[in-house]
């Protein structure tokens, strides 16, 4: 699976994903809204699945000391090539399943914004969460993004539901599909099993992916109203259940 992940991201435009269109943008806007609200000033942060550094650079510009890591060497090379790369405290290629290069209780916050999309089984997801917890200070935050099973099925199934069996099988644990989806309830269970105290479970893009054509056709003014709607309701269970991207934020007790 690790080689499959690396091969996929060698040609995927991760750098532009969150800003591709109005249906993708709410995930970013909602995420940074919560991070801004919860992170203490000048926090030491590990962005353990940094991708090309979208959140790392945002947080560094806010005055935090950010270490950006990613499994994919190409992503780290992109980060290092950016003109503001010196804003980051450190960059490294590493696997969130093994953060042994970092000592216990090293960071005020740890972001795991991608591993849950790909780790194939419960034990691996839990192992990643426990590694994030280990390197986080007591009282610090662990943020875990995930793909929501219900929204993923709705988005992937063809008109007429002709491929429903294949879509459902693709998201099962142990399948060979690159993308792994979970549920809000399972994410909360993982957090509890890892000994974390859940603070927020958020549907970061609301139902934007379910009605993507309508969202993408919106004027800027209408989109601002849409974002206010998402912010108001993004923690309601019904909304979380149909948001393509979820974000669970927990505290290390």
Image (cartoon, grey):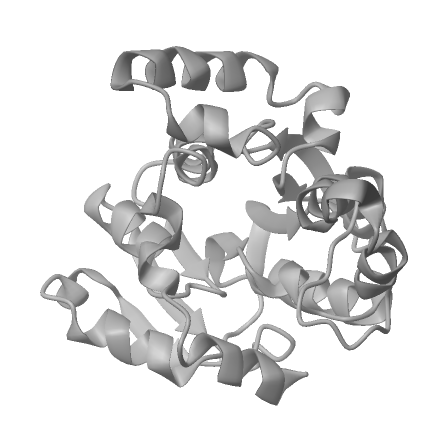
Query: In the picture shown, does residue 107 fall above or below 10?
Result: above
**Residue at 24% over, 63% down:** 88
Residue 235: % across, % down: 65, 22
Considering every residue shown, the one lying at the far left of the view is 83
Which residue shows up at 38% across the image and 33% down it? 22
Assign the N terminus to one quadrant of the image: bottom right
Residue 37 at least partly seen: no
Q: Is residue 93 above or below residue 111?
A: below
Vertical order, 123 against 226 (above or below): below
User: Which is more toward the observer, 174 or 161?
Assistant: 161
Above-or-below relation of 7 to 152: below
Residue 246 in the image: state x and y as whole percent: 63, 40
Q: At x 56% / y 60%, what residue is drawn?
A: 114
Q: Quadrant of the C terminus?
A: top right
Residue 29 shows up from this direction: yes
Identify the residue shown where x is 70% and y is 47%.
Answer: 152
């Amino acid at each position: 699976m690790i080689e499959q992940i690396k091969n996929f991201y060698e040609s995927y435009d991760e750098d532009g994903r969150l800003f591709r269109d109005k249906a993708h943008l709410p995930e970013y806007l909602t995420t940074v809204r919560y991070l801004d609200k919860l992170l203490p000033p000048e926090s030491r942060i590990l962005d353990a699945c940094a991708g090309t550094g979208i959140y790392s650079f945002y947080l560094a510009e806010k005055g935090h000391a950010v270490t950006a890591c990613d499994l994919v060497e190409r992503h780290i090379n992109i980060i290092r090539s950016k003109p503001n790369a010196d804003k980051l405290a450190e960059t490294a290629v590493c696997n969130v399943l093994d953060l042994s290069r970092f000592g216990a209780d090293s960071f005020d916050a740890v972001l795991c914004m991608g591993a849950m999309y790909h780790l194939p089984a419960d034990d691996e997801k839990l192992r990643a969460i426990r590694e994030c917890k280990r390197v986080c200070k007591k009282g610090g935050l662990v943020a875990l993004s995930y793909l929501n099973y219900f929204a993923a099925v709705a988005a992937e199934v063809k008109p007429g539901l002709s491929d429903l069996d294949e879509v459902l099988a693709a998201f099962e644990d142990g399948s060979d599909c690159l993308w792994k989806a979970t549920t809000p309830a399972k994410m909360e269970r993982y957090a509890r099993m890892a000994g974390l105290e859940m603070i927020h479970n958020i549907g970061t893009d609301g139902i934007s992916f379910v009605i993507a054509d309508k969202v993408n056709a919106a004027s800027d003014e209408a989109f601002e109203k849409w974002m206010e709607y998402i912010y108001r309701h993004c923690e309601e269970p019904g909304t979380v259940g149909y948001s393509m991207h979820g974000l669970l934020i927990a505290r290390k007790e």
